[in-house]
Amino acid sequence: MSATPSPPLLAVSMGDPCGIGPEIIAIAIEAGLPARCVVIGDVGVMRRAVEQACLVLPLAQLDTPEEARDAAPRCLPVWQPDGLPAALAALPMGRVSADAGRAAVACIEAGARLALERRVSALVTAPIHKQALAAGGSPFPGHTEMLQALAATGGALPEVRMMLANDELRVVLVTIHVGLRQAIDLLTTERIAQTIRIAHHAAQRWGQPAPRIAVAGLNPHAGEGGLFGDEEARVIAPAIARVRGEGIDASGPYAPDTVFMRARHAPGHPGEFDLVVAMTHDHGLIPVKYLGVERGVNVTLGLPFVRTSPDHGTAFDIAGSGRADAASLRAAIDMALHLATQSA
């Protein structure tokens, strides 16, 4: 007889210790989660988060991440990786700190290693602060680029893309953390085609064998036949034609000011599409975030493991006040569990 597989274990990196990441992790675990989680972070920071949130939540300091499987319910299981700066719990809340940036990077790296080694089923990352990352010496502007580098094999970077999703809309981005002028320069037929492929294959892994993919244009009215720009005809339409020749159900380019409404799955309004591919960061993320930051989840597509994150930042303005909302983190954990289970 074959052995019963172990239930999924998810790793949750603490994020910036001066932001709301540790607090929302503690709140989510105290409320109860659908999966076993191990928190990768500083024990002192996580104890402080429990106090700031006014929780009655015992903390278990683990010697190995796997010990989280046997942790008591409603217990905060923390595994502290090597290399964290000292006295992180003494850092002031809501301030950019180089040590906080270094700590966030160390926890992300440790979580990625666990995922790559298949010691955890998925990685959920709490928010980081980009200025703190830079102050701490990180060359990466965000999670996506960092995880891409950590997942490199033989010097080759995997092709990754950011997807922001909630229960009504899923959007995959061709370009992310670069200036708008540079983003437009990065739009090539092959880059757009590869984004559509990544979106298609990801949707297949989570149970949609033939996802309907809408491709948004770049310019107003999708260029209006060349009156407002030629990128649609010159680079976007050829990318769509290329992937359609590979059997992918992609269509467009559609006017970016209406395609998201057409794709939205809402009560009484079944969406025309399962995914939207958007050319730039704000084109794609504004409509998803408008539907509710507390429901949004950031998913990195193209990695050899599942990675999700809340759809918000470190919220330095309320960090340490006990007013943080853990809803988006809970949604990220729910989606990580779902995707890890579908991909198993």
Image (tube, rainbow, N blue to C red):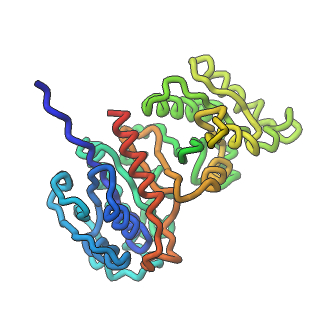
Q: Is residue 74 left or right of residue 271?
A: left
Residue at left 37%, top 75%? 53
- Viewer-proximal residue among 153 and 302: 302
Q: Quadrant of residue 269?
A: top right
Q: Position of residue 193 (x, y in %)?
A: 60, 30
Q: Is residue 184 left or right of residue 199?
A: right
* Residue 173 seen in render: yes
- Up the image or down, 252 lies above or below 184; here it is above
Q: Is residue 217 left or right of residue 84?
A: right
Q: Position of residue 323 (x, y in %)?
A: 47, 75
Please state the total of marks drawn on the protein image: 0
Q: Position of residue 67 (x, y in %)?
A: 16, 55
Q: Quadrant of residue 137?
A: bottom left
- Viewer-proximal residue among 95 and 137: 95
* Residue 155 seen in render: no
- Up the image or down, 273 lies above or below 320; here it is above
Q: Position of residue 219 (x, y in %)?
A: 78, 43
Q: Quadrant of residue 79?
A: bottom left
Q: Is residue 16 left or right of residue 260?
A: left
Residue sitting at the far right: 227
Task: Look at the image and tell me in which quarter the C terminus lies.
Answer: top left
Residue at left 37%, top 34%? 342
Residue at left 34%, top 37%? 341
Residue at left 41%, top 74%? 18
Residue sitting at the far front: 268
